């Protein structure tokens, strides 16, 4: 079985609604391959290792969270960029990338899936006045240390906790990836803890001075789950074979 590339793109546009977001990269089809898709590969980032494994598996298309053509990056197609694009074009593999739309989807997105897997109840937008908000806040009765253990069991890596491990939590805010600056929104939302992927030097001071616990659980590690959920949904909708390729990244 399988379907057309155009049908997959239409489903993704209808589901993820990329037009709602002012993003740092083009969302949707970034590199055009063959017109039909029977095998869909997914990954967090379209790095060379993922490309090689997807091509070896026989993928017709690769769907990722982190694709190419970011704002501010050098435009010449040389070096690493040339090698990546050459691999896709030579093997007629389409590259589909969705950044903020994949973070924000209320059921299949990175934040939604992380919250579901952690057992966070009653999730809502972290910034309810922003229709394109990409963070969430919900309820979970747990200690900070226990939450870190749950994250470690889920992601396979030890998170960094700023704050006391025995602190009891009830209101949890989170935003996957490089969203450490959202800690201010978490404070405004009355959260006891904010979970994100990365941490910066000022984040530590903000957490300590605002009285909120902070957990950095890994950029890649927290963004594994949305693209898998979208890939599985596409496989069900169109009868595709789907394979997720995880390329470890310690950040």
Image: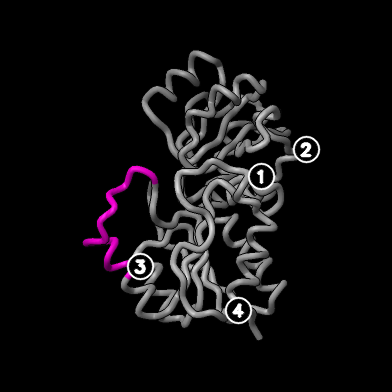
Question: Badge 4, how many Cα within 10 Å: few under 14, some, many 20+?
Answer: some
Residues at circles 4 and 1 in contact by the CB criterion of under 8 Å:
no
Label tally: 4
Residue 146 visible in the snapshot: no
| Magenta stretch, residue numbers | 71-85
Pointer 3: what residue?
49
Query: Considering the numbered disc 2 on the image, is that residue within a helix, a strand or a loop?
Result: strand
Question: Badge 3, how many Cα within 10 Å: few under 14, some, many 20+?
Answer: few
The residue at 63%/44% (across/down) is 20
The residue at 71%/41% (across/down) is 120
Residues at circles 1 and 2 in contact by the CB criterion of under 8 Å:
no
**200 or 28: nearer the eye?**
28
Image: 221 above or below 89: above
Query: Considering the numbered disc 4 on the image, is that residue within a helix, a strand or a loop?
Result: strand
Q: Residue 122 got which mark? A: 2
Pointer 4: what residue?
241
């Amino acid at each position: 079985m399988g379907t057309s590339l155009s049908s997959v793109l239409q489903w993704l546009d209808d589901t993820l609604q990329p037009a709602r977001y002012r993003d740092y990269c083009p969302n949707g089809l970034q590199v055009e391959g063959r017109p039909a898709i029977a095998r869909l590969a997914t990954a967090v980032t379209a790095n060379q290792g993922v490309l090689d494994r997807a091509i070896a598996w026989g993928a017709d298309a690769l769907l990722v969270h982190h694709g190419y053509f970011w704002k501010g990056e050098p435009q010449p197609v040389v070096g690493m960029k040339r090698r990546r694009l050459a691999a896709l074009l030579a093997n007629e593999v389409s590259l589909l990338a969705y950044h903020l739309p994949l973070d924000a989807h209320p059921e299949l997105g990175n934040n939604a899936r992380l919250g579901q897997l952690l057992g966070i109840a009653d999730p809502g937008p972290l910034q309810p006045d922003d229709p394109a908000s990409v963070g969430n806040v919900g309820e979970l009765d747990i200690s900070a240390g226990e939450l870190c253990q749950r994250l470690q069991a889920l992601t396979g890596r030890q998170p960094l906790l700023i704050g006391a491990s025995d602190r009891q939590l009830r209101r949890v805010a989170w935003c996957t990836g490089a969203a450490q600056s959202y800690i201010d929104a978490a404070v405004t939302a009355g959260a006891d803890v904010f979970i994100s992927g990365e941490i910066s030097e000022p984040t530590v001071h903000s957490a300590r001075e605002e009285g909120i616990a902070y957990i950095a659980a890994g950029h890649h590690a927290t963004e594994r789950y949305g693209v898998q959920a979208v890939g599985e949904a596409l496989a069900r909708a169109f009868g595709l074979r789907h394979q997720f390729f995880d390329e470890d990244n310690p950040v």
